[in-house]
Amino acid sequence: MLKRSRVLASAAVVALVTGLGAPAWAETLQEAIALAYQTNPSLLAQRANQRALDETVVQARSGLRPTLSASARVDYTRSDFPTVTQFVDTNSDGVPDTQVSSSSSESDGANLGVSLSQNIWTGGRTSLAIDQARARVMAGRENLREIEQSVMLSVIQAYVNVTRDMEILRIRQENLAVLQRQLDETSARFEVGEITRTDVAQAEASLAQSEADLANAQAQLSTSRAAYAAVVGQSPSDLETTPALPTVPTDFDAAMETALARNPGVLSAGYSLQAAEAAVAAARAEYLPSVRATASYGGTATDLGNLDELADRRSFTAGATLSVPLFTGGLNRSRVAQALEQANAAQIAIEGERRTVLQNVSSAYAQVLSTRANVAAGEEAVRAASVAAEGVRQEAQVGLRTTLDVLNQEVTLRASQTSLATARAAEYVARASLLSAMGQLEGPSLNANLAVYDAKANYDRVRNRGGLPWDGVIETLDRVASPPVVDADDAPDAPIDTQLKTDVIRTAPGA
């Protein structure tokens, strides 16, 4: 799958750089969604980040398992020291004659051994670290959902922009053809003296303006096509009409209820709070003792020339170590206070996400209502302008209307058609934005045939890597008498001002 994604993305880049037409891989919105789902860089990068986050659980669970290490040592020692010999005074100068000499000694040796260490009880440090890692993995999955929804919304926006600009370009081309015929008819009537030169000039001016509008429409379409290629992974071909989106609620309260239950930002903030609260308990666990079992086995040789001593002079040691922290210079207390503040911040962040959801749902819901009204009004405007344009053209044929009347009505009709195309695109995007704010704009909900990426599958595959049969026993023992995980503002030693701020946030409107 990843290799195919790279091939598709590379082909898209080549098509953009060389200007060649890209193969028609994505002619429908579902196909565009499928291609972006497989190749979008932001989405692929977030999936890689999530797989990296899964590894933190493996790393945390490694604390349940023993560590085994081997060591080998070879040494050589040489010692030099002087030797002083005192003699009898032979020259009668009153000073005994002395003689200084030196001697040395050499030794060598080797040591070879293995050591084993197994945590028995860490006061909950290991098990709480596992809880933190799991909560962060769950938060990461929600962040992945958020990126996925953002990409899906970008695909829909890009797709709708291209279809809208293609429709506007068609309107501009049709308008140019109509005005060209109008100029031809006006010129013919001027030749036979039915109208004046002013009528011809008016038709020429309208035609020139239409050509400028056409050039602008072509430029806008090129811009939208480039944005589409950046999100989807290839240049668009002849795109089909947008399909129906999943139904959006007609009741605002229902939309908000769904958003608060499903929005990935809110859910991710909740899991982040769980991780922060586990971190508080882990910081408190630093006050508790820990028990570790150790064992070592090895041999020693005092002569490198006789390494057989390694087998003869062997030793085995086994025991248990109880470590009790007595004084850390305020380190543990500071870590607990820091963890509490981080937990309070995580708790307040939940309310921040809820308010963001309220804003996004309110805005998207209002846009849905507004754009629906605009579409209805636009359809009526196009109907009325079409009838009026046809009537003015017929009246001009019998001399009841001037050429300027015809041209003005044509401008009104094209403007109405352009506004309707824009309104329909905006209404479609508004409904997609509402679904995104509610947490329901995921790839599988837009394309039932999508090969779904399952973040949980990788987690299930790696979570027990390196596991041993007694992991569960050690984890159960480690949780005995470990500090409980409590809500941040339920902690007795949480700062008073932080508790008050949290209470104010929780009683805010919409909480």
Image (cartoon, rainbow, N blue to C red):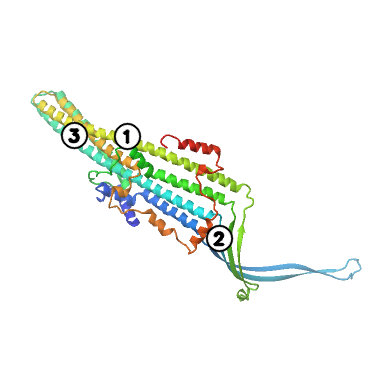
How many numbered badges does the structure rendering display?
A: 3
- Name the foreground residue: 481 vs 138: 481
Seen in the picture, residue 351 relative to 142 is either above or below; the reply is: above
Residue 175 got which mark? 3
The image quadrant that residue 294 belongs to is bottom right
Judge by depth and name the residue closer to the eye, 470 or 105: 470
Q: Earlier in the sequence, mark 1 or mark 2?
A: 2
Earlier-in-chain disc, 3 versus 1: 3
**Category of crowding for the residue at label 2, using alpha-carbon neighbours closer than 10 angstroms: few (below 14), some (14–19), many (at least 20):** many
Mark 3: which amino acid? Asn
Name the amino acid, label 2.
Ile
- Between circles 3 and 2, the one closer to the viewer is 2
- Nearest-to-viewer mark from 3 and 1: 1
Q: Quadrant of the C terminus?
A: top left
Q: Which residue is mark 2?
A: 120
Mark 3 vs mark 2: which is more N-terminal? 2
x, y percent for residue 159: 28, 43
* Residue neighbourhood size for the residue with mark 1, other residues' Cα within 10 Å, grouped as few (<14), some (14–19), many (≥20): some
Q: Which mark is residue 366?
A: 1
Location of residue 387 in the rendering, given as x and y in whole percent from the top left corner: 14, 30
For image coordinates 44% across by 41% down, the residue present is 350
> Label 1 to label 2, Cα distance in Å?
59 Å
Image quarter where the N terminus lies is bottom left
Label 1 close to label 2 by CB (< 8 Å)? no
Above/below status of 96 relative to 436: below
Query: Residue 60, can we see it?
Result: yes
Residue at disc 2, secondary structure: strand
Mark 3 crowd level (few <14, some 14–19, many ≥20, 10 Å Cα): many
Q: Is residue 190 visible?
A: no
Given the image, on which type of amino acid does mark 1 rest? Ala
